[in-house]
Amino acid sequence: MNSVTDSFGWPLQDPGWTSKILVQGLITIIPIIGWIATLGWFAITVDNYRAGRKELAPYGFHLERGIWLFLVYFLYSLVFSIPGIILGVAAGSADNSALAALGNLINFVLRLGLYFLTPAIILLTYRNGISGGFDFSGIWRMSMSNTGNTVVAALMIFVANLIGGVGVILCCVGLIFTLPYSVAVVAGVVTWYEKVMGSPSLAPPTQPA
């Protein structure tokens, strides 16, 4: 992974990418279980990319590899949304447009902050499970050690998420392709991010007990 833009091409260089993406896409649309399975698929794809193989993970219910990524990011998303939700409810109760605007502004700023931290959150959770995902000082140090690389990685993850949502245009059927493809792109971004941040060698990630 020499460039972050390789993240968009590598998924399509696997000879079996069509079946892997489409079947994993069908799994992904299963609520909760499918999301966890696809995050496990993401983790195995990162394994391959780190080893220099342009190879997607085999499709399947990779629940053990995905559970911590799901829980960690779900909790971060929840916590970062709480201030905006509280202000929104308060604004609705008081019919206060200024308070509602403040809530929207805070929500926007926190979303930007979460996107900035996301590359490090994903990478440390991938490596060390839930303990890595909530290693707040480690996440902050990694994110701030080279803010340029962090911003680029966060922007590419944002673009990948946009791609993931494009499938809605085709009566949601396109999500079967765009969602797993976007996850594979994020796998490439995280692999690139680890490399350019001067992170440890390609040792297998520590698996939680």
Image (spheres, helix red, strand yellow):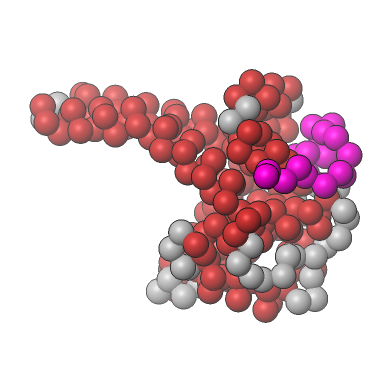
Q: Within the image, what quadrant is residue 134 found in?
A: top right
30 with respect to 86 (left or right): right
Q: Position of residue 98 (x, y in %)?
A: 21, 24
Q: Position of residue 25 (x, y in %)?
A: 56, 70
Identity of the residue drawn at 24% across and 32% down? 88
Q: Image height check: is 77 above or below 100?
A: below
134 with respect to 170 (left or right): right
Identity of the residue drawn at 66% across and 71% down? 59
Q: Within the image, what quadrant is residue 190 found in?
A: top right
Q: Position of residue 9 (x, y in %)?
A: 75, 61
34 with respect to 41 (left or right): left
Q: Nearer the viewer, residue 66 or 107?
A: 66
Quarter of the image with the C terminus is: top right
Identity of the residue drawn at 81% across and 58% down? 48
47 with respect to 36 (left or right): right
Please, which residue is most extreme toward the front here? 209
Q: Position of residue 33 (x, y in %)?
A: 49, 62
Is most of the magenta stretch helix, strand or loop? loop
Identity of the residue drawn at 15% across and 33% down? 92
The magenta region covers 192-209
Q: Is residue 119 visible?
A: no
**Total count of labels:** 0
